[in-house]
Image: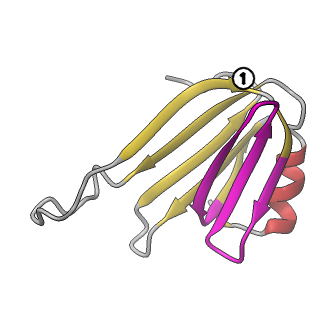
Amino acid sequence: MNPIDKSMVQPLLDSFLNREVYLHLETTNGAYAVHNQESNMTVGAYIRNGRICFGRGTITGDGPYRVGLKMEIGWVYAEGLTDFEMAQEGQLLLAGHDQEGRLAVALELSLSPFEL
């Protein structure tokens, strides 16, 4: 993956506008949480191959970044993004890694379903 460059990511987001796409969205500290401290709460969210259509996609911030996808009746967004890549034709991967390189958030868009 490469560090996010907004001028490169925005046109990639735009290529998915007004199309039915598959979404992978994941947040986690579960596998990486420090479980020996009672004050830590393990949290996470996961969706794979959710089908969405968005009319506006925007990347904001100065790093880490936030991506918002405006759908007809709602929003999808991910915050804390640091890296991106075009994994293959029609597939954009965005991820947020902490200072130790551990995954904290992933937002992926694809024109075809993701492998299970």
Way the structure is coloured: secondary structure
- The quadrant the N terminus occupies is bottom right
| Percent coordinates x, y for residue 54 in the rendering | 82, 35
Question: In screen coordinates, is 64 left or right of 47?
Answer: right
Q: Is residue 59 left or right of residue 84?
A: right
Whether residue 86 is visible, yes or no, is yes
Crowding at label 1, few (<14), some or many (≥20) Cα neighbours within 10 Å? some
Q: Is residue 89 visible?
A: no
Seen in the picture, residue 106 relative to 16 is either above or below; the reply is below
| Magenta portion: prevailing SS class | strand
Of 2 and 43, the residue lying toward us: 43
Residue shown at 44% from the left, 69% from the top: 98
| Three-letter code for the amino acid on which mark 1 is drawn | Ser
Residue range highlighted in magenta: 57-83
Give residue 32's quadrant in the image. Answer: bottom left
Q: Which residue is pictured at 81% across the width and 55% down the height?
A: 58
Kindly identify which residue carries mark 1.
Answer: 112
Residue 78 lies within the magenta run: yes
Among the 4 quarters of the image, the one containing residue 95: bottom right
Does 89 appear above or below 42?
Answer: above
Report the number of discs.
Answer: 1
The percent position of residue 92, horizontal first and vertical second, equals: 72, 44
The percent coordinates of residue 9 (x first, y second) are 80, 58
Residue beneath the point at 54% across and 28% down: 48
Residue 48, compared with residue 9, is above or below; it is above
- As helix, strand or loop, the secondary structure at mark 1 comes to loop
Q: Nearer the viewer, residue 31 or 62?
A: 62
Residue 70 left/right relative to 36: right
Q: Residue at x 82, y 31 (%)?
A: 72
Q: Is residue 94 magenta?
A: no
Give the image location of residue 17, x and y in percent.
Answer: 89, 37
